[in-house]
Each structure stands twice: as C-alpha cells, then as structure tokens.
Image (cartoon, rainbow, N blue to C red):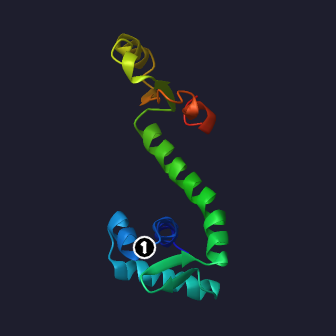
Amino acid sequence: MELRDIEIFLTLAEELHFGRTAERLRVTPARVTQAVKKQERQIGAPLFERANRTVRLTPLGRQLRDDLWPVYAGLQDGMRRAKLAAQGVTAVLRVGTLPINVYDLRPYWDTFRTRHPQWKLQIQHASFVDPFAGLRRGDLR
C-alpha cells in the first residue's frame, strides 16, 4: 500500500464522504474510489459500507484505521522534524498563554528567538475556560 493510498484511506475514514475527502486531499473523487477499491482488493474484504449517500467503516476498516493512524502520524512528524532540521531548527517549544498577555510577553519571545535560533517557538492561545487542557493533551510542554 502506497503512502498516498494510506492518506486517502485515513481521510475517508475521518470524513466518511468521498467528495469531501477528494476536496480535502485535492484529488478527484474517482481517485479516492480507485484507491479504496485497490486497498479492498489487496486486503480481500470491504473496508467501507457504502449505502445510498452513506459511508461507514466496516469492523475491518476500523481495525485498519486504528492500526495505521499511529504509523502515519509518526511518518508525518518525522517529515516535519526533517524539514525543520533542514532549516537549522532542531527543537520546538510550544507555549500556551492566555490571549490577554501575549503582547506583554513579546519581548521575552523575541529574546528567546534571538538566543536560541535552533528552536522554533510556537505560541498557542489557551482557553479561559480550561487553560491547562493543552498540557493534559500533551500539546504543550
């Protein structure tokens, strides 16, 4: 199975709509259909139930999605890190802050960027309702 076919499968498993999947991946709906049929032939069983305007994962499709997603996410993360390393960026610091104080902290962000050019700084707005949600999810460190 090719990487693009895996991407098509995972996107269709999320969208559950051939047209939206095609639009999101900038391919034709025929390409999405072709990729899914190819995967189903290789595996030997349907991955999706297709009814009148309804698309659902089969139990096998859910299993495949659950097995492929961590591998695909790891590949994407590896490519992202390689691109950053090619730019001289070897690490990323993600900081969550309330929208109120972002401007006040700008001198600190500028100093950090000047002293640590090998780091990429990502500032993310935290919710007033649950400001620690990003930490719990692991989005912020």
Location of residue 80 in the rendering, given as x and y in whole percent from the top left corner: 47, 46
Instruction: Say which element carries label 1.
Output: loop
Q: Quadrant of residue 44?
A: bottom right
Q: Position of residue 135 (x, y in %)?
A: 59, 31
Quarter of the figure with the N terminus: bottom right
Image location (x, y in percent) of residue 117: 42, 23
Q: Please tell me which residue lies in front, 57 or 4.
A: 57
Residue drawn where x is 50% and y is 32% of the image: 90
Amino acid tagged 1:
His
Image quarter of the C terminus: top right
Does residue 83 sit above or below 61 in this rendering?
above
Determine the residue positioned at 41% across, 77% down.
Answer: 32
Relative to residue 28, is residue 4 drawn left or right?
right
* Image position of 59 with respect to 119: above or below: below
Specify whether 60 is left or right of 122: right
The residue pinned by badge 1 equals: 17
Q: Nearer the viewer, residue 96 or 8?
A: 96
